[in-house]
Image (cartoon, rainbow, N blue to C red):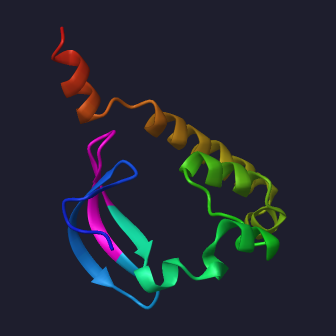
Amino acid sequence: MIEVGQSVDGYRVERLIGRGGMGVVYEAVQTYVNRRVALKVLRPELADDPVFAPEERAQRGIEQLPETLGEAIEIAAESELVLRILGEHTFKRFIEIKREEWEEYRVQVTPWELERFLSIL
Protein backbone atom coordinates (compact mmCIF):
# COMPACT_ATOMS: atom_id res chain seq x y z
CA MET A 1 0.00 0.00 0.00
CA ILE A 2 1.37 3.42 -0.95
CA GLU A 3 1.28 6.08 1.75
CA VAL A 4 1.21 9.87 1.39
CA GLY A 5 4.78 11.15 1.85
CA GLN A 6 6.30 7.92 0.55
CA SER A 7 8.76 7.93 -2.35
CA VAL A 8 8.14 5.43 -5.14
CA ASP A 9 10.53 5.03 -8.08
CA GLY A 10 11.49 8.71 -8.19
CA TYR A 11 8.03 10.07 -7.31
CA ARG A 12 7.11 11.62 -3.95
CA VAL A 13 3.44 10.92 -3.19
CA GLU A 14 1.66 14.11 -2.07
CA ARG A 15 -2.01 13.15 -1.74
CA LEU A 16 -4.68 10.67 -2.75
CA ILE A 17 -6.79 11.89 -5.68
CA GLY A 18 -9.16 8.96 -6.03
CA ARG A 19 -9.87 5.25 -6.38
CA GLY A 20 -11.32 3.44 -9.35
CA GLY A 21 -12.18 -0.06 -10.44
CA MET A 22 -8.59 -1.24 -10.86
CA GLY A 23 -6.41 1.55 -9.60
CA VAL A 24 -5.62 4.29 -7.16
CA VAL A 25 -4.54 7.75 -8.34
CA TYR A 26 -2.22 9.99 -6.36
CA GLU A 27 -0.86 13.47 -6.89
CA ALA A 28 2.90 13.11 -6.82
CA VAL A 29 6.07 15.04 -7.60
CA GLN A 30 8.56 13.57 -10.03
CA THR A 31 11.57 14.42 -7.88
CA TYR A 32 14.17 14.40 -10.65
CA VAL A 33 12.54 17.34 -12.44
CA ASN A 34 10.32 18.69 -9.63
CA ARG A 35 7.20 18.23 -11.76
CA ARG A 36 3.69 17.49 -10.45
CA VAL A 37 2.11 14.40 -11.98
CA ALA A 38 -0.81 12.05 -11.51
CA LEU A 39 0.53 8.66 -10.46
CA LYS A 40 -1.83 5.75 -11.11
CA VAL A 41 -1.11 2.38 -9.56
CA LEU A 42 -2.96 -0.92 -9.43
CA ARG A 43 -5.00 -1.52 -6.31
CA PRO A 44 -2.91 -3.63 -3.92
CA GLU A 45 -5.25 -6.61 -4.11
CA LEU A 46 -4.79 -6.70 -7.91
CA ALA A 47 -1.04 -6.11 -7.96
CA ASP A 48 -0.32 -9.74 -7.01
CA ASP A 49 -2.63 -11.15 -9.68
CA PRO A 50 -0.44 -13.18 -12.06
CA VAL A 51 -2.23 -11.72 -15.09
CA PHE A 52 -0.45 -8.40 -14.40
CA ALA A 53 3.04 -9.92 -14.23
CA PRO A 54 5.29 -8.80 -17.13
CA GLU A 55 5.88 -12.42 -18.17
CA GLU A 56 2.14 -13.14 -18.35
CA ARG A 57 1.46 -9.96 -20.35
CA ALA A 58 4.24 -10.86 -22.79
CA GLN A 59 2.89 -14.40 -23.16
CA ARG A 60 -0.55 -12.96 -23.99
CA GLY A 61 0.97 -10.53 -26.50
CA ILE A 62 0.13 -7.47 -24.38
CA GLU A 63 2.73 -4.75 -24.96
CA GLN A 64 3.70 -2.07 -22.48
CA LEU A 65 2.53 1.46 -23.21
CA PRO A 66 5.20 3.94 -24.32
CA GLU A 67 6.97 5.62 -21.42
CA THR A 68 7.59 8.94 -23.17
CA LEU A 69 6.01 11.12 -25.82
CA GLY A 70 9.07 10.39 -27.96
CA GLU A 71 8.38 6.65 -27.84
CA ALA A 72 4.68 7.24 -28.62
CA ILE A 73 5.56 9.40 -31.63
CA GLU A 74 7.87 6.74 -33.05
CA ILE A 75 5.16 4.10 -32.64
CA ALA A 76 2.66 6.40 -34.38
CA ALA A 77 5.20 7.04 -37.16
CA GLU A 78 5.13 3.29 -37.93
CA SER A 79 1.34 3.00 -37.72
CA GLU A 80 -0.47 2.08 -40.92
CA LEU A 81 -3.77 2.92 -39.19
CA VAL A 82 -2.76 6.51 -38.34
CA LEU A 83 -1.39 6.97 -41.87
CA ARG A 84 -4.67 5.78 -43.43
CA ILE A 85 -6.81 7.90 -41.12
CA LEU A 86 -4.84 11.14 -41.58
CA GLY A 87 -3.76 10.71 -45.17
CA GLU A 88 -0.14 10.75 -46.27
CA HIS A 89 0.42 14.54 -46.38
CA THR A 90 -1.22 15.26 -43.00
CA PHE A 91 0.41 12.19 -41.44
CA LYS A 92 3.93 13.25 -42.44
CA ARG A 93 3.38 16.80 -41.19
CA PHE A 94 1.78 15.59 -37.94
CA ILE A 95 4.74 13.32 -37.15
CA GLU A 96 7.19 16.09 -38.05
CA ILE A 97 5.45 18.57 -35.73
CA LYS A 98 5.21 16.06 -32.89
CA ARG A 99 8.92 15.22 -33.19
CA GLU A 100 9.73 18.95 -33.01
CA GLU A 101 7.48 19.35 -29.95
CA TRP A 102 9.14 16.39 -28.24
CA GLU A 103 12.61 17.76 -28.94
CA GLU A 104 11.65 21.20 -27.55
CA TYR A 105 10.20 19.58 -24.43
CA ARG A 106 13.06 17.13 -23.98
CA VAL A 107 15.80 19.77 -23.96
CA GLN A 108 14.12 22.38 -21.78
CA VAL A 109 15.79 23.27 -18.50
CA THR A 110 13.56 22.49 -15.54
CA PRO A 111 13.16 24.62 -12.38
CA TRP A 112 14.88 21.79 -10.46
CA GLU A 113 17.92 21.96 -12.76
CA LEU A 114 18.09 25.75 -12.50
CA GLU A 115 17.96 25.63 -8.71
CA ARG A 116 20.36 22.74 -8.40
CA PHE A 117 23.05 23.83 -10.86
CA LEU A 118 22.81 27.63 -11.12
CA SER A 119 23.02 28.08 -7.38
CA ILE A 120 26.54 26.65 -7.63
CA LEU A 121 27.64 29.53 -9.88
| Residue 83 on image: x %, y % | 79, 61
Q: Toward the viewer: 99 or 40?
A: 40
* Residue at the far top in the pictured view: 121
In reply to whether residue 62 is colored magenta, the answer given is no
The main secondary structure of the magenta stretch is: strand
Relative to residue 2, is residue 70 depicted above or below? Answer: above
Looking at the image, residue 60 sits to the left or right of residue 100; the answer is: right
- Measuring 81% from the left and 56% from the top, which residue is drawn there? 88
Q: Toward the viewer: 11 or 86?
A: 11
- Measuring 63% from the left and 55% from the top, which residue is drawn there? 72
Relative to residue 40, is residue 91 depicted above or below? Answer: above
- Measuring 28% from the left and 28% from the top, which residue is drawn there? 113
Q: Can see residue 43?
A: no
Q: Can see residue 112?
A: yes
| Residue 114 on image: x %, y % | 23, 25
Looking at the image, residue 106 sits to the left or right of residue 113; the answer is: right
Region of the chain picked out in magenta, as a range: 25-37
| Residue 109 on image: x %, y % | 34, 29
- Measuring 64% from the left and 71% from the top, which residue is drawn there? 53
Quadrant in which the N terminus appears:
bottom left
